[in-house]
Image: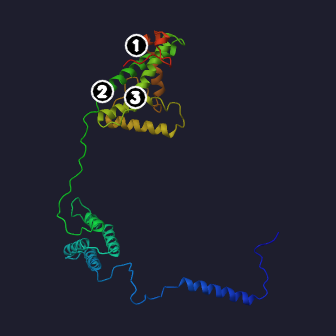
Amino acid sequence: MRNPFKRQPTADPISAMREQRAALEAKASTLNAGKDRQPEPGAPRTASAPPASSAVSVAIHEHLHAYAGRLYAEAYKMDDADTRAEQERAAFWAVLHTPLASDAERLVYAKAVIERASGVYGRECYGNTRAAWMGVAYRNFAFGEYAPESDMELPALAAAGPVASDGRGEYLARLVTAYAEDRASRPIAITAEFNSIEDEASRLVLRRCRDVCVEILALPAPQAADGLALVALAAAITLEVSLDGEDNPQPEAVAAVVATRALLGVTGTALPPGFSGFGDEPDCSERDAALFDRPGSLPAWAIAAAEAPDEDEDEDGAAPLAS
């Protein structure tokens, strides 16, 4: 195979080297072109920085001198440290209120303000008044409003007051009732004959409890403590025994349980009677099994719905839930 990197013989190596050197020198001359060129007399001058005699340049120079003096005085614990601090603030105040006549002046002005705001004394640049330094700098830079302002305090944004209640007591009553009915129906659900009235009624009870939890969790975010407690209770019932038998539970499930426990603790919400646990408690299985060792009962609405003719049932085969 042909080697593309193999050196090809040349007829005159010296001539080839001279040609390469000439090419490099020509390229280098183009890179340096214009660096030492002087503007022609009378040609307009485009400066990237304002002249040193401009008002903003003088003010910035005086401020930097005062800034250095303040730093020096504070570093060496000098007696006039407070005086130099006031002098530095006054010098920067003079910079802020200097009129800007060109884009070059605006550039060095913005640089000086940013350096002061991000420096050792940067906190002094902020405040809630019209005379706060950053506000002054913005008005001068954007609108040319450099005149000093009165130290008038700006109106604070109105904050929404605390909400006393979310008014969701009806949801809480429905949830507590549905959960109590679910606990009482468990012994019958496990022994009922398949497709019997008792089996259908037990499934309706379970479905109602689940649907109430889903309805509560779909409500807008709570604004009061009672609404937050309601969400905590609905989440706890939804996540009951969700971690049971899981050696390596999903991180999402663990996170949901941890968050629910935190909500229960923050709101002081007690778990309802008969709650088996989230599944990671040592006695969760025993508490869950105890539900089936007691006498059970079914609510009248569930029995009536289970006995209702098929034409009264919805598409899922379940009777409409009573409110």
Q: Whole-Å distance between the Cαs marked 2 and 1? A: 22 Å
**Which residue is the site of mark 2?**
169
Q: Is residue 160 placed above or below 238 in the rendered structure?
A: below
Disc assigned to residue 215: 3
Q: Dot 2: within a 10 Å radius of its alpha carbon, few (fewer than 14), some, or many (20 or more) residues?
A: few
Q: Is residue 264 above or below residue 115?
A: above
Q: Secondary structure at mark 1?
A: helix
| Amino acid found under the numbered disc labelled 1 | Trp
User: Tag 3, which secondary structure?
Assistant: helix
Question: Where, by quadrant of the figure, is residue 221 drawn?
Answer: top left
User: Amino acid type of disc 2?
Assistant: Gly
- Lower sequence index among marks 3 and 2: 2
For the question of whether residue 187 can be seen, the reply is no
Which of marks 1 and 2 precedes in the sequence? 2
Three-letter amino acid code at disc 3?
A: Glu
Left or right, residue 81 beside residue 198: left
For the residues marked 3 and 2, what is the alpha-carbon distance in whole angstroms? 14 Å
Q: Nearer the viewer, residue 151 or 192?
A: 151
Sequence-first tag of 1 and 3 = 3
Quadrant the N terminus occupies? bottom right
Q: Which label sits on residue 291?
A: none
The residue sitting at 78% across, 80% down in the picture is 8
Identify the disc placed on residue 301.
1
Label 1 CA crowd tier, 10 Å (few <14, some 14–19, many 20+)? some
Q: For the point 42% across and 20% down, which residue is it?
A: 182
Q: Residue at x 33, y 33 (%)?
A: 229
Q: Residue furthest right?
A: 1
